[in-house]
Amino acid sequence: RVVPGAHALRVMTNPGSRSPAWATSTGRALLARMDDVQLAKDFSSGLESVSPASPRSLPELMERLEQVRQQGWAVAIDEAVPGVGSVSCAVRDPQSGDSMAFCLTFPTAMACDAELERLAGLLLEQASQIGRKVGDNHWSVNAG
C-alpha cells in the first residue's frame, strides 16, 4: 500500500515493484529479522551491485543488518532508487509468520541526521504499537 506525501515532490515506489532486498530499507528491515545462517545460505552467491551506496558483499550486508537490529530501523540513501532515501521498520505476525515493513521515503536532499532520526522515531513508535498488538516478541522486548 502506498500513501503519497503532501510535499510538492512525491517519492514512492508502486506496489509490486521489485528491488533487491539488500539495497532497500524495507528489504534490510525484513532481512534483519532473519537468522544469520539462513542469510549466509541465501546470499552465498554474492550480491549484485545496485549502487555505490548499497552493500556489495555478504559481510557488508551483515554489518548493516546488525546495525538495523541494534537501532530497530533501516535506512537507505541513494541505493535502489537514485536521489531517494528511506527509513523502515518491520513487524512479524507470529500466528501467520507473515512479515511486513513500514517505510517513509523522501528526497535525499532531506537526508540529514536529524531528519533521519525524526522519521525513524515516528516509524519506531508505530511499528512498536503494531508489533505489540500482533504479539511480535521483538517489539515486546524492544518496546518503544
Image (spheres, helix red, strand yellow):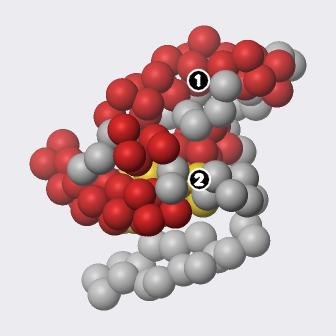
Answer yes or no: is residue 123 visible: no
**Residue extending furthest right?**
45
- Number of numbered callouts drawn: 2
Q: Along the line of sight, which residue is nearer the eye, 31 or 18?
A: 31
Q: Residue at x 73, y 25 (%)?
A: 39
Indicate which label's residue lies in the foreground, 2 or 1: 2
Q: Residue at x 58, y 23 (%)?
A: 61
Circle 1 packing at 10 Å, graded few (<14), some (14-19), many (20+), is many
Most distant residue in the left direction:
114
Residue corresponding to mark 2: 92
- Of residues 43 and 89, the one nearer the viewer is 89
In the structure shown, which secondary structural element does the residue marked by tag 1 occupy?
helix
- Is residue 106 shown left or right of residue 37? left
Element marked by disc 2: strand
Is there CB contact under 8 Å for labels 2 and 1? no
Q: List the residue tagged with mark 1.
A: 61
Local packing at callout 2 (Cα closer than 10 Å; few below 14, some 14-19, many 20+) is many
Q: From the top left corner, tell me how far across and down residue 30 is, in percent.
A: 60, 45
For the residues labelled 2 and 1, the Cα–Cα distance comes to 21 Å
Q: Residue at x 64, y 76 (%)?
A: 14
Name which of mark 2 and mark 1 comes first in the sequence.
Answer: 1
Q: Residue at 83% across / 19% down in the picture? A: 41
User: From the image, which quarter does the N terminus lie in?
Assistant: bottom right
> Can you give x and y, in whole percent of width and height, for residue 24 in the image?
56, 47
Residue 69 position (above or below residue 123): above
Query: Looking at the picture, which amino acid does disc 1 mark?
Result: Leu
Q: x%, y% of residue 2?
A: 54, 80
Amino acid type assigned to the residue bearing label 2 in the image: Arg
Q: Residue furthest top?
A: 59
